[in-house]
Amino acid sequence: MSYRIQVHPDAGSLLRTFAPHVVLRLGRALAELADALANGEDADGNELHVDDCVMRFVIDRAERLLRVVHVEQRGSLQPAYATAEATM
């Protein structure tokens, strides 16, 4: 049985400000973590680091649930789209 993934509404709002390729990479990393947990592996900490983003999560083993509680993009005070537009 696999793990379900739940994204806190605040984290989801922030994810919508990121560039699509960053969201895809974060999603892929999260799916790999869920698969690893389903196969009985342990997570190394409670954060995923992808590019310049950090995603914090909580694992509920009883519910087989992976909750994303926070996401942030480091190194920039602007959302990914604003940064991309400024460089064009």
Image (cartoon, rainbow, N blue to C red):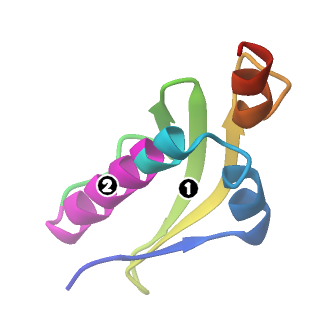
Which residue was labeled with disc 2? 33
**How many numbered circles are shown?**
2
Q: Position of residue 55 (x, y in %)?
A: 58, 45
Q: Quadrant of residue 8?
A: bottom right
Cα separation between marks 1 and 2: 11 Å
Q: Position of residue 53 (x, y in %)?
A: 59, 32
Q: Can you see residue 47?
A: no
Q: Amino acid at mark 2?
A: Leu
Q: Position of residue 74 (x, y in %)?
A: 70, 23
- Is residue 72 depicted above or below 69 in this figure? above
Magenta segment main secondary structure: helix
12 in magenta = no
Which residue was labeled with disc 1? 57
Q: Depth check: give the residue in front, 70 or 87.
A: 87
Residue at point 58%, 61% (across, down) = 68
54 vs 73, left or right, is left
Residue at point 77%, 60% (across, down) = 13
37 in magenta = yes
Q: Quadrant of residue 12?
A: bottom right
